[in-house]
Image (cartoon, grey):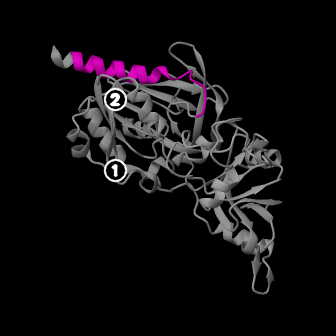
Amino acid sequence: MTDDAVLILEDGRSWRGKAYGATGSTVGEAVFTTGMTGYQETLTDPSYHRQVVVMTSPHVGNTGMNGEDGESARIWVSGYVVRDPARRASNWRSTGELADQLADQGVVGISHVDTRSITRHLRERGAMRVGIFSGAALATDVGPRTTAELLAVVRAAPEMTGADLAAEVSTPDAYLVPAIGARRFTVAAVDLGIKTMTPRRMAERGIDVHVLPAASRLADVLAVQPDGVFFSNGPGDPATADAQVELLRQVLERRIPFFGICFGNQLLGRALGFGTYKLGYGHRGINQPVLDRRTGRVEVTAHNHGFAVDAPLGEPSNTPFGPAEVSHVCLNDQVVEGLNLIDGPAFSVQYHPEAAAGPHDAGYLFDRFSSLMGEAHDAQKN
């Protein structure tokens, strides 16, 4: 068995390198992330389900893997692309090597490729399907597989547009993340691909978080007697999430405070009557500048999304639940990064305030959610 590996994009462009992690074959959507740290959080983020992640940072694996920083119980990426993998991990928290974890979990990767040229190609041509092939996947009974044969495998893979993936990454059973200290509020969090740090950030603020499966209905949400409802990040095309959009509309009708992150932002957009669309190559990394249009403050934020809300950036829009505004925009390309229901207790952001990994500029949004629930609670008393 050879350690050679090949990466082939659906437009026929290819790179040769060395097998990294497991050997074999994998296909998915090729995306790149610009974070220089946090590779363990990236690998274990369920939003990367069915994606092959290209790391723009050239050195990966330096700090190994540990049992504390994972955003879920497993690696979710379909494939992994790095330029210079670390020869050995060197960190006091490390409990194992990245390459070993990839191999143990069957994640096919490739190393020693020019990730800069792959990233430039994706920026120019857009995210597309990709395959990584190594070991036995490069051969047949009669000889090596041809480039045309490998390319056919890539082009037969499903596209991300139209992909309904939330149920594939969601928890099968509800569970509770208890408040740290005195309980102030209770939140029903619909798991569309939730990261471990998100309910932890709410628990730190005295919130009992009931994490519910993606297929939950209004009765499931109301059963925990929530002070607020949260929709998480997650993979796939928001245009497929009709059941979750209907649930959210029912929440908005009852004026239950709502907060959404990433996929949750896109679903709030749909619930308000806006459309969604696929970005050319998406936003992925921990250094994305976002403008809060109400305060003029610029936040450096963590992103992982390939779809966005199609909402006007001008005056507030009329929706079935009252006027709504675009609260945040990305300064790189003016993509909608947040929504706010002006006369209702609902808001969302496209980025990741739980900051795992990433900057902490947006942590105040969890406090804002707590304030919304407190205001609703006070209004009920009066």
Q: Reply above or below: 140 against 290.
A: below
Identify the secondary structure beneath mark 2: loop
The quadrant where residue 124 appears = top right
User: Residue 161 location, x and y as percent?
Assistant: 55, 54
Residue at the spot of label 1: 243
Total numbered badges shown on the rendered structure: 2
> From the viewer's perspective, is 240 left or right of 360?
left
Q: Which of 256 and 202 is in front in this view?
A: 202
Mark whose residue sits in front, 2 or 1: 2
Task: Assess whether residue 371 is covered by the magenta stretch.
Answer: yes
Image coordinates of residue 59 in percent, x first then y, are 78, 42
Q: Where is residue 27 in the image (x, y as percent from the top left)?
A: 64, 62
Give the magenta-colored segment's residue range: 357-378
Q: If the image is split into quadrants, where does the C terminus sit?
A: top left
Residue receiving disc 2: 179
Question: Main SS of the magenta segment?
Answer: helix
Q: Distance between the residues labelled 2 and 1?
A: 29 Å
Q: Is mark 1 on a helix, strand or loop?
A: helix
